[in-house]
Image (cartoon, rainbow, N blue to C red):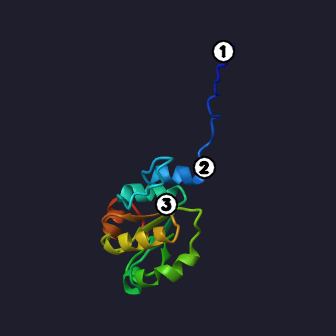
Amino acid sequence: MELTLTTSPPPATTPTFLERVRRLFGGGPDDGRVRPTVNATRALELVTDGATLVDVRESSEWKSGHAPRAVHIPLGQIDQGARRLTKSRPVVVVCASGMRSRTAAKQLRSLGYEATSVSGGMAAWQRAGGEVRR
């Protein structure tokens, strides 16, 4: 007697929230990678889709103009300030040029957040159509 084993294809599943977030940031559903930076147009899309925008500039820079829905956490306070964020929502980090925001996004990722930096900073954010309130 010959025995043949067959397997059924795995059931179709709806991607989890984190899988969808990874895809938004450029990671595949199974690789877990998050792009360290995104362009400002992509950042606007992510924020529109529910990501939290974090501005890591100093207070004087923040007062000179910031995105209305941004959370202000200066870079030097990012570890403590991260408690104000929700790990179930992706985080888009912005600064003046993109340097500090890359550092902050890396720190946030090490704390378990899905975080990315806006390449080009606030100037790029504005050029892409991002609102700025003074």
Which residue occupies the foreground of this view, 27 or 101?
A: 27
Residue 60: which quarter of the image?
Answer: bottom left
**Residue at 55% across, 59% down:** 50
Which residue occupies the foreground of this view, 85 or 49?
A: 85
Q: Amino acid at mark 2?
A: Thr
Task: Name the element at disc 1.
Answer: loop
Q: Position of residue 97 (x, y in %)?
A: 30, 71
Please give the label number shown on residue 96. none
Q: CA distance from mark 3 to mark 2?
A: 19 Å
Please give the label number shown on residue 47. 3
Q: Position of residue 74 (x, y in %)?
A: 43, 82
Q: Position of residue 107 (x, y in %)?
A: 44, 73
Q: Is residue 132 visible?
A: no
Residue 104: which quarter of the image?
Answer: bottom left
Task: Name the element at disc 2.
Answer: loop
Q: CA distance from mark 3 to mark 1?
A: 58 Å
In the picture of the structure, the residue carrying the numbered disc 1 is 2
Q: Amino acid at mark 1?
A: Glu
In the picture of the structure, the residue carrying the numbered disc 2 is 16
Q: Nearer the viewer, mark 1 or mark 2?
A: 1
Which comes sooner in the sequence, label 1 or label 2?
1
